[in-house]
Image (cartoon, grey):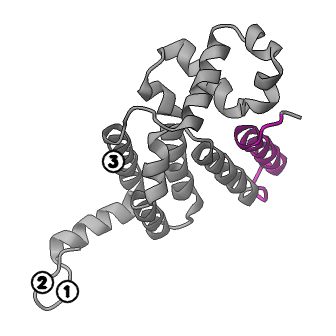
Amino acid sequence: MTERAGGTPTAAARAVLAGLLARPWLALIAALILHTALWLAAQRDIRAADPLYYADNAYRLTHGSEPMLATHSNFVFVLRIGLTGPLAAVYALAGISTLTTNLPCLLAGLGILAIAYAAAPTPRGKLLALAFGAVCTPLVTDGRELTPDLPCGALVAASILCLTRRDRPRGPWWIAGAAALWFAAFQVKEVAVW
């Protein structure tokens, strides 16, 4: 916030803050655009072994999984199917590139910002959640290459958000959604599907 020499905010800064408090969804849109721009700027070629392993498994799933699943070392239990399955669908729909490989982590980062926004009960809380999310280093650093951590974190956060809404109308549906999201998070991070 801009301050005058006396330490009080200027009228323009107060007007911007009042406008954001009246319409916090504008701050959400700005945070999502900023996160996407940072994600695009931070893209680089994949160098680490784990992202290459996940991308290779997704590529193999895209081009027929029978030979891959026939060998014991590539059995479905070691695929982290909650990460490689959706990535294989992205490959089939949008092609294979560094951007499409890292797309699940972009979507997870955007989801985390949206969940933080939705979880805060007041407009001021929503703005604070977005401000903290905008400066959260793991959202940018983990989002630039394919790892299971950020997608798993987004799914767990969504599960917790659903649980916090269980006392609202359609409470059992919120609980069922939380269980489904928790199971999806388990499939992203763990190496077993049962």
- Magenta stretch: helix, strand or loop mostly: helix
Dot 2: few (<14), some (14–19), or many (≥20) neighbours within 10 Å?
A: few
Residue 147 is covered by the magenta coloring: no
Amino acid type assigned to the residue bearing label 1 in the image? Thr
In front here: 83 or 157? 83
The residue to which callout 2 is attached is: 4
Estimate the x, y position of residue 82 in percent, counting from the top left: 70, 33
> Magenta region: which residues?
166-192
Q: Cβ–Cβ below 8 Å for labels 1 and 2?
A: yes
Amino acid type assigned to the residue bearing label 2 in the image? Arg
Q: Which of the two discs, 2 and 3, labels the residue nearer the N terminus?
A: 2
Residue 121 located left or right of residue 21? right
Q: Is residue 64 depicted above or below 150 in this figure?
A: above
The residue to which callout 3 is attached is: 34
Estimate the x, y position of residue 125 in percent, counting from the top left: 49, 68
The quadrant in which the N terminus is found is bottom left
The residue to which callout 1 is attached is: 8
- What is the C-alpha distance between the residues marked 1 and 3? 28 Å
Disc 2 on helix, strand or loop? loop
